[in-house]
Amino acid sequence: MNTLKKIALATGLSLGLTALHSAATTTDSTDSVIIDIAGHQVPVVAGGLYDRFHSNPPLDVIAEEDPTLDLSWFKTLTKTRVDMGFESYSPNFYYRNSRVTMVFTADLDALKAQMPAEVLEQVQPLQIWPGRGLIALTAYAYHYCDNDSYNEIALSIVTNKPGSANMGPFSLIGQSMDSNMWGYVLKLPVDTEVARVRGVVGYNLPKWLTRIDYRESVDALTFDVYDSETGKLDFTIQADRLDDVSTVPTLTTTSFTNLDHDGKLVWGHAVSRQMVSASSSDAEDAKLTLGDGSFSEFIRALDPGRMIQYEYVPEFQSALYAPEPLSTLLKQ
């Protein structure tokens, strides 16, 4: 069993892309409409999926708008109406997406210091070797989803599963074999207001609005992340395209534990269908260039080591489920 490949499966936490976004908001006053989400006045694309269907578009509409999509997996899933601080449907569907993930070691005490005491009672960072845990930095480009399209950056701590012993690398391998990785989300900026409000109100995730530029070239996928206060470039992720890819669809789950708005423990999860994927342990295949912004400073404070795993997933689909009380999981 290749341990580095198992570590790669720790990527994609969060929970959590056709248009390239070049501004903090992807809509402007000429082609957006305002909708109310839990008292927030949110601009969305006029005539877009969210404007028309509010997270519940018929699959035949998706098929008509993009006949190239394979919707067979989504046809096996059932949406239900939920109250998550606003009325919505779960799971939220992501039809065509790309992501890249970089996994680093980080200072274990610094990671613990970022987690609420109530969460630490249930889950802890996995210690890979003395004094070192793992963080996963994932960049998502959601090209086409129930929320139209947006970009997102997730920084997460890799943890044990609630109710399971924390056995460090053995827990990591066990989660990898189950294709269900657990984490605690530290940062989750997005570049549309609808993604921000839904994430903060519905999932209590640490989202804020900022500019995230995504671009593709023959050789790489690149994400430029800007500081929300200064507007200056904060950091860049440049991820090389890998040649030795798998095109056999595989299902993976990423799950998180956090507190809801009432301070109660909850858990959430996303199931992803990876259509094209590959991984590498060569640090030259993906590069993180930090700058002077607040997100870069936060990453530095975790004392990240050399990148130990890179996961390249240029094509995947996903279903993000509404959070539930952690007690429901612990009873299973």
Image (cartoon, grey):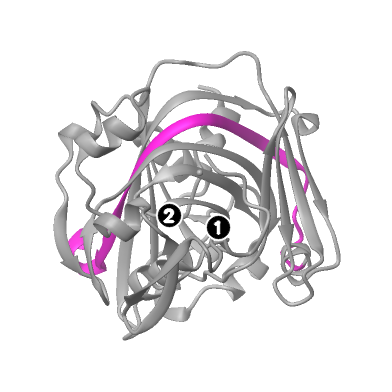
327 up-or-down from 225: above or below: below
Residue assigned mark 2: 15
Among the 4 quarters of the image, the one containing residue 102: top right
Callout 2: SS: loop
What amino acid is labelled 2 in the image?
Leu
| Identity of the residue drawn at 51% across and 32% down | 6
109 up-or-down from 236: above or below: below
Marks 1/2: CA–CA distance: 10 Å
Q: Which residues are magenta?
A: 301-330
Q: Please say whether residue 309 is visible from this viewpoint.
A: yes
Q: Residues within 10 Å of mark 1 (few under 14, many from 20)?
A: many
Whole-percent x, y for residue 133 in the image = 62, 54
Q: Please say whether residue 332 is visible from this viewpoint.
A: no
| Identity of the residue drawn at 79% across and 75% down | 230
What amino acid is labelled 1 in the image?
Ser
Q: Nearer the viewer, residue 126 or 241?
A: 241
Residue assigned mark 1: 156
Q: Residues within 10 Å of mark 2 (few under 14, many from 20)?
A: many
Of the 4 image quadrants, the one containing the C terminus is bottom left
Whole-percent x, y for residue 175 in the image = 40, 41
Among the 4 quarters of the image, the one containing residue 312: top right
Mark 1 or mark 2: name the one nearer the start of the chain. Answer: 2
The answer to whether residue 56 is left or right of residue 228 is left
